[in-house]
Image (cartoon, grey):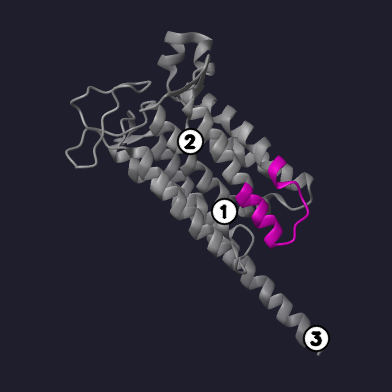
Amino acid sequence: MLPYIHLWHLNLPTFGLMLWLAAVAAAFVVDRGFKRLHIDADAVGMVAVAVVAGIVGAKLWHVIDTPMEFHEQGWRVLWDSAGFAWFGGLAFGIFALVFQGWWAKIGGLRTLDLAAPAAAIGYGVGRIGCFLSGDGCYGVETKLPWGMTFPNGIEPTPTFVRVHPTPLYELAAGLLIGWWLWWRGGKQRGTGAILGEYLVLTGMARFLVEFIRRNPKVLWGLSNAQLASAGSVVVGVVLVAWAARRQVTRAEEAGKVVEKTA
């Protein structure tokens, strides 16, 4: 593992480096999405604000989710390079995008549709940072041939214990989901449909990977992340259904207008 890259007297954390790369990838995807639909707005700036909000939210949610760390480390835990919760980052990032979309007169929900592929891809790229730093978000012990050890990670594992490299699983899932949403976004969809699919697919991916991660169980044998993921899936299903019904209604109304003017 490579938690830090040593350049002269500088120690660059690979987690932060990959987080920056994830933001660059997300900004590129959103910018391409804006150009595909001929939207005149600062995609890069919007992503930058959303990333900062997401980092703050991810750290705050992690602190709330693991109060023992705050009890042991105090306020220093807020500046630790490890410990970021997916759901907190998602919630704060969504709020930042909705506000900016409203401000730019694109529409909050439409902005989230446009950002959904970028969010999935950025999340996947960011997981490379977790993998390189060995920050403890890997899985439980496994006998599978691709199991790995993290003896030099921020949270090391014993050299003889092989665990699931779950960040790599999430990288693959993020890239696949991002590609699917980008392809879907190129077709005519009801506003909110792409966001709904994003919530369903990413929620399912995170729910499943949690079964082999080392997070503590809090309710019904499920982790906090799984409960949040289940909620994400439910909201996503409702949003997809609502967007489809709204699209049909608008099509019917357009048809009636054509009949009246004919």
Residue type, numbered disc 3: Lys
Q: Which of these two is toward me, 164 or 61?
A: 164
**Residue underneath mark 3:** 260
Q: Residue 86, which numbered label?
A: 2
User: Is 1 left, or right, of 117 in this rendering?
Assistant: left
* Mark 1 crowdedness (10 Å alpha carbons): few <14, some 14-19, many ≥20: many
Q: Is residue 2 above or below residue 220?
A: above
**Residue underneath mark 1:** 195
Secondary structure type for disc 3 = helix
Residue at image location 56% in from the left, 58% down from the top: 194
Residue 57, position as x, y percentages in the image: 57, 30
Residue at image location 46% in from the left, 51% down from the top: 175
Report the Cα–Cα distance between label 1 and label 3: 34 Å
N-terminal label among 2 and 1: 2
Q: Is residue 165 above or below residue 150?
A: below
Residue 135, position as x, y percentages in the image: 39, 26
Residue at image location 59% in from the left, 39% down from the top: 23
Residue at image location 72% in from the left, 40% down from the top: 45
User: Is 230 left, or right, of 187 in this rendering?
Assistant: left
Q: Residue furthest right?
A: 261
Residue type, numbered disc 2: Trp
* Mark 2 crowdedness (10 Å alpha carbons): few <14, some 14-19, many ≥20: many
In which quadrant of the rendered image does the N terminus lie? top left
